[in-house]
């Protein structure tokens, strides 16, 4: 069962750069430039305590240190591997317009329409209230220049930029920063090792502490065909990405690129990750860390990685590539046991403190400091999570009350064989709990239904997967006379027209999902302070049958 994850926030400085800008490798990295007090304590001690308490009986006593190191490295590296496998799947394509959500490295996929149904698997929990432009970038050789066109002030957008560890750059362009960051403009995306000067035409520089960068741009759409076409033809079509060396000159991205037929492009990346044995996991991690080395704040983990051979010592003459062939049989056994324990720790970690209505509503994802277990949990359950200033997510997998009880046992899981209702109170100036979500600026909210594996449900009847008081998927939920809102969740269409207007179709039981288990996912874009402070929370998911 997928679990919601605990969360943490850290701070990154916003600096606007104009004119000719000199960048050198000694300057502070954007996505990791946190003060010591902002990093927070590492949670590896908690991980190692769990690992010691689970020492396998068949573990050779001489390999205990290898086992403990392996557990720590597994948790530390999990988010990097999640990004690596998502990149591998998403970029193994000849050109950017061939398949939903995929583009070659250093190119942009630009969605022509919203995702529909379970076939879209490259992003966990894809939104249907905004259109995507995505891409994986490698900044090792030189910076990339991202050009953003004009986006009207009434249309919400965010260009989420994640580093290889899934930390979101605080300087990701967004509607919320429209008065600070220039839009339209040319943004220089700079890796940690590059030295040089940027031309005067650059509007802003965004520096990363990894050479791997993942863009997930979201642009609000009403969901009508005309509006989806507008986003595709007027916004995405005018976005460009090019290497610094070609800046100022015509540039056409290469196409007809070679495709590796041995790469599994069907299985979800997180599922591939969770099926990896120790040799594959640590080998891939080692390869990724050749161009995405530990950050300064990760100094405490470096000795562990060096002992395992995942990275080389600082004075090593050449980069180190982990290989099981260089390990003894006892060490290989210890590492296999370590991976099994790491998986068990991830699966057994309890959910965060829930709201009184049984929602997980984290208000501190997107930048993790040295909270490696937290980072791994978010990567596993909601890879690509944003910072709370831009989006706060609500995760519901349990009902709120039934026969006078509430809880998080299996009997309270959400199943398509049941019927549920959520009652949002009318909005007031109090922005109180249970009210319709309070939103700032041009932001909006939506609630979406997913299968338990994080894919969209293949609806049998309903034409939409999400609801909101703002038009999403060409549909606006219907308010009650007093301004409140009832959302009905069930597998069959309600007979009442008002209920039908506010219906989310739950999955029918299938051979692989006997009870039609599902998730409800709340998004609040540009949330009000009442949400980010934790004062507001959504109503319960009440079982009605």
Image (spheres, grey):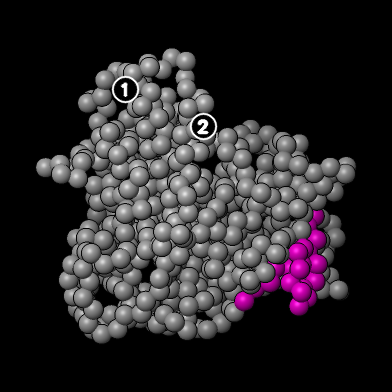
Q: Residue at x 43, y 14 (%)?
A: 58
Q: Are marks 1 and 2 in contact (CB under 8 Å)?
A: no
Q: Quadrant of the C terminus?
A: top right
**Depth check: 422 or 329 in front?**
329
Q: In the rendered image, which residue does mark 2 sit on? A: 50
- 275 up-or-down from 178: above or below: above
Looking at the image, the residue that sits furthest to the left is 317
User: Residue under circle 1?
Assistant: 331
Residue 291: percent from left, percent from top: 25, 51
Q: Nearer the viewer, mark 1 or mark 2?
A: 2
Q: Residue at x 22, y 64 (%)?
A: 25
- Which x, y percent locates residue 296? 31, 54
Point out the tag, 1 or 2, that comes first from the N-terminus: 2
Q: Is residue 279 above or below residue 152?
A: above
Q: Give whichever of 252, 148 is nearer the camera.
A: 148
Total marks shown come to 2
User: Residue visible at 70% across and 64% down?
Assistant: 535
Q: In which quadrant is the N terminus drawn?
A: top right
Asked if one can make out residue 348 in the rendered structure from this viewpoint, the answer is yes
How many neighbours does mark 1 have within 10 angstroms: few (below 14), some (14-19), or many (20 or more)? Answer: many
Question: Residue 46's spot in the image, x, y percent?
Answer: 50, 38
Residue interval drawn in magenta: 421-440
Residue at the outermost front position: 37
């Amino acid at each position: 069962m997928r679990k919601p994850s605990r969360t943490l926030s850290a701070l990154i400085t916003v600096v606007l750069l104009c004119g000719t800008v000199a960048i050198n490798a000694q300057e502070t990295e954007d996505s990791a430039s946190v003060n010591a007090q902002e990093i927070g304590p590492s949670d590896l001690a908690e991980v190692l305590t769990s690992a010691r308490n689970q020492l396998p009986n068949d573990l050779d006593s001489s390999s205990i240190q290898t086992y403990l190191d392996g557990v720590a490295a597994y948790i530390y590296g999990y988010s990097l591997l999640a990004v690596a496998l998502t990149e591998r799947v998403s970029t193994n394509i000849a050109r950017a317009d061939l398949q939903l959500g995929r583009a070659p490295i250093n190119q942009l996929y630009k969605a022509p329409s919203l995702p529909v149904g379970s076939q879209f698997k490259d992003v966990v929990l894809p939104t249907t209230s905004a259109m995507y432009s995505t891409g994986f970038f490698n900044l090792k050789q030189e910076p990339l220049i991202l050009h953003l066109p004009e986006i009207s002030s009434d249309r919400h957008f965010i260009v989420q930029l994640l580093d290889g560890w899934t930390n979101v750059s605080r300087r990701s362009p967004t509607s919320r920063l429209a008065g600070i960051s220039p839009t339209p403009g040319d943004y220089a995306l700079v890796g940690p090792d590059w030295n040089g000067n940027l031309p005067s035409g650059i509007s802003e520089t965004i520096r990363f502490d990894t050479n791997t960068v993942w863009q997930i741009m979201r642009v609000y759409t009403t969901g009508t065909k005309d509006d989806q076409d507008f986003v595709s033809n007027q916004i995405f079509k005018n976005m460009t990405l090019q290497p610094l060396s070609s800046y100022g000159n015509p540039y056409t991205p290469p196409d007809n690129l070679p495709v590796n037929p041995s790469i599994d492009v069907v299985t979800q990346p997180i599922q591939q990750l969770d099926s990896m044995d120790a040799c594959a996991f640590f080998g891939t991690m080692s390869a990724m860390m050749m161009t995405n080395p530990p950050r300064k704040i990760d100094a405490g983990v470096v000795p562990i990685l060096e002992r395992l051979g995942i990275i080389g010592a600082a004075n090593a003459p050449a980069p180190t590539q982990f290989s099981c062939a260089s390990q003894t049989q006892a060490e290989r056994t210890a590492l296999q046991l370590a991976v099994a324990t790491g998986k068990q720790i991830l699966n057994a970690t309890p959910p965060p403190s829930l709201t009184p209505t049984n929602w997980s509503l984290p208000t501190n994802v997107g930048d993790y400091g040295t909270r490696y277990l937290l980072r791994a949990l978010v990567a596993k359950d909601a890879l690509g999570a944003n910072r709370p200033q831009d989006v706060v997510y609500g995760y519901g997998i349990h009902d709120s009350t039934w026969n006078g009880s509430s809880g998080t046992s299996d009997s309270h899981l959400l199943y398509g064989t049941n019927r549920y209702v959520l009652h949002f109170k009318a909005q007031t100036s109090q922005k109180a709990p249970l009210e319709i979500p309070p939103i700032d600026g041009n932001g909006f909210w939506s609630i979406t239904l997913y299968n338990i594996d994080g894919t969209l449900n293949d609806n049998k009847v309903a034409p939409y997967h999400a609801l909101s008081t703002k038009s999403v998927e060409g549909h606006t939920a219907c308010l009650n006379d007093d301004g409140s809102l009832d959302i009905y969740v069930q597998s069959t269409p309600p007979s009442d027209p008002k209920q039908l207007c506010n219906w989310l179709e739950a999955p029918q039981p299938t051979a692989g999902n006997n009870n039609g288990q599902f998730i409800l996912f709340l998004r609040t874009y540009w949330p009000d302070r009442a949400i980010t402070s934790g004062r507001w929370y959504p109503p319960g998911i009440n079982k009605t049958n």
